Image: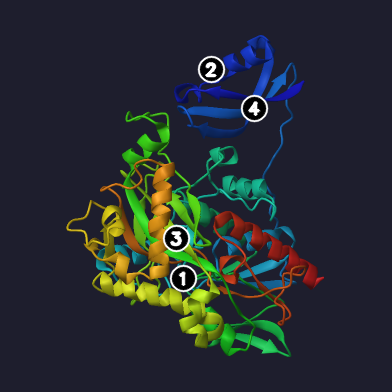
Amino acid sequence: MKTQIEIALLPENALSDSAIRSEISDQLQISAEEINAVRLVRRSIDARKFPVYKLLLDVYVNETPTEENPFINYKPVTGKKKVAVVGFGPAGMFAALRLLELGIKPVIVERGKDVRGRRRDIKQLMVDRLVNPNSNYCFGEGGAGTFSDGKLYTRATKRGDVKKILRIFVQHGAAEDILVDTHPHLGSNKLPEIVSSIRETILRCGGEIHFESRVTDFILKDKKILGVVLNGNEELLADSVLLATGHSARDIFSLLQAKNILLEQKSFAMGVRIEHPQALINEMQYHTKQKNEYLPSANYSLACQVNNRGVFSFCMCPGGIIVPASTAPDELVVNGMSISKRNSPFANSGFVVSVEPEDFKPYEKFGPFAGMMYQKEIEHVAFEAGGSNQTAPAQRVTDFLKDKISSSLPKSSYFPGTVSSPLHTILPQAIVQRLKEGFVQFNNKMRGFITEEAQMLAAETRTSSPVRIPRDKETYMHKEITGLFPAGEGAGYAGGIMSSAMDGENCADAVARFLK
């Protein structure tokens, strides 16, 4: 007999097989000998009173479970049908894998370098503060997710098969814990190997991947796309084009507009990144000052409404660091990342405010790019406030609330360094006032959130794309260009690794239907 039960265990017992079986025996009132097998379905932490692990288990009583192979057997493709996949981030990667499943050859073009080459350029950005526009934290093999926390939690469970995406990650080297943890993550130290393994699967099965290949033109005829031009002179013809370039590929948006391809404005969010000591977050969330070695670095998720706009935490990185995510030399963008152990002494999170088309009115002459120009302006202001060298303008949260320049700043994980700046004047007032009210509300939910030890770094602007590439709801194809399939964050239809991966798969399925 198979039965499913939930048990609660103290952190020090949650990984003990004997403790788990003992609790099962007590709850089901059976002997330990009757338990043939136990499979963990879901694992979460409940810290409302004191921290315990909640384990959802499939228990096999006097029954042996059947063994199943959850992995996909990717087979070689012939190349009779060829799809150009532009961008090798989560949407492009999972679109390519799905095309292989469907027997269609993906030809991937990526403006950036492979993960090894990206590491050198990121080091140059961190140490020498030089931005390579085509190889950085946003562009290159694996996209923006490769050098990030690798958060795999998503609320978009209706967009696709979440478990399938997680299993594909495990198939390519991720720990099996991601299949059961309620907030799974991979870590920036693990992701490059996983991404490289996905690349090897694609190449082994007959797909192609071309790095340092930037799309500079689209090949169009009678409102149908026939391929793309790379690096200004190389034509790549294909049966269709799946466009998965990410939320920071502004040159692609400009190219689409130059080719009279329909684009739309889109709401998004901007603000700052806040950094606390991780020990303080642990104390607030776990209700104790003592560090428990059996508990991970604590995280949080906060949201409220201020003057009809959302104010919320974004991409929270427990035990993480803040990094420069700029993609051009005259801008400053910050983001967060952490390794799999999440053992940095700092916790950071984006804190952002929803921005709507009415906020873009001073830029309305730019049409669908109004939001993008608003975004660029804030990034440039942050760049200049930091000294024009990737040093981040920063301010203690307590001083921000008092409209006061910080006379000193706490230590920060941000390697290029910080400089005290009046964020309350350099950021747009619509964002400033909502952040202030939001922080007060968040402090009511998490006592101690507002503290001298918390500081803000600007600017957190790349939460999602400020532009949408409109597509048909049924066919996933662009509303005007036959054979063009916009996918992922850059198209305006996803946010994060998981939703982008599922959107990539959905677009690949749509491509297959189109090619039939």
Circle nearer the viewer, 1 or 2? 2
> Which of the marked residues, 3 or 4, is nearer the chain's N terminus?
4
Image quarter hosting the N terminus: top right
Q: Residue under circle 2?
A: 19
Q: Residues within 10 Å of mark 1 (few under 14, many from 20)?
A: many
Q: Is residue 338 above or below residue 327?
A: above
* Cα–Cα span, label 1 and label 2: 49 Å
Q: Residue under circle 1?
A: 112
Circle nearer the viewer, 2 or 3? 3
Q: Position of residue 418 (x, y in %)?
A: 24, 61
Residue 453 can be seen, yes or no: yes
* Cα–Cα span, label 2 and label 3: 43 Å
Proximity of marks 1 and 2: CB atoms separated by less than 8 Å: no
* Cα–Cα span, label 4 and label 2: 13 Å
Q: Residue under circle 4?
A: 57
Circle nearer the viewer, 1 or 3? 3
Question: Regarding mark 2 in the picture, which secondary structure is present there?
Answer: helix
Q: Position of residue 200 (x, y in %)?
A: 56, 57
Question: Regarding mark 1 in the picture, which secondary structure is present there?
Answer: loop
